[in-house]
Image (cartoon, rainbow, N blue to C red):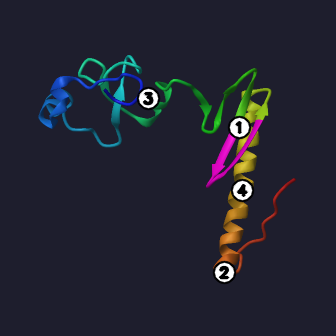
Amino acid sequence: MYGGRGTTVHKSWHRFEGFFADMGKCPEGLTLDRWPNRNGNYGPKNCRWATPLQQAINQDRVDYAAGVRRKGRGFEARIKRGKMIFRGICDTEEEAIAVRRQVKESLDIAVAFILRWWHGQPSQARYRIAP
């Protein structure tokens, strides 16, 4: 058993030689993905080498854009910085993407400014965070 969902690993894959015989060497930039049945078992008939995009599409929930997902009747824009989470609910996907982009840019500017100040480096440019 794998995890709490009852997923199993094909018996021949309990040894690396069996896994390698079925899947071969992992191509650069790819990782193992359960496909076509994302909730199925790990085995030669249900696994492939996949790109990060293919794996994202194959998840239980679909991200409309990085940090944006369907939430009830709207769309949630979310950014995580350490233990802090910034999130908001928008009516449309486009609005959520725009809000997330604007907040992320503001946070990136603020963090860069604070790090320069902390390390005693003068800022090379003046930063303005729009309201």
Q: Earlier in the sequence, mark 1 or mark 2?
A: 1
The disc placed on residue 127 is none
Residue that badge 2 annotates: 121
Q: Earlier in the sequence, mark 2 or mark 3?
A: 3
Number of numbered tags placed on the structure image = 4
Instruction: Give the image location of residue 99, x and y in percent.
Output: 76, 41
Three-letter amino acid code of the residue under disc 3 = Gln
Residue 31 falls in which quadrant of the image?
A: top left
**Distance from label 2 to label 3 (Cα)?**
42 Å
Q: Nearer the viewer, mark 4 or mark 3?
A: 4
The disc placed on residue 107 is 4
Residue 92 drawn above or below residue 87: above
**Distance from label 4 to label 2 (Cα)?**
19 Å
Q: Earlier in the sequence, mark 4 or mark 3?
A: 3
Q: Which residues are magenta?
A: 77-88
Disc 4 element? helix
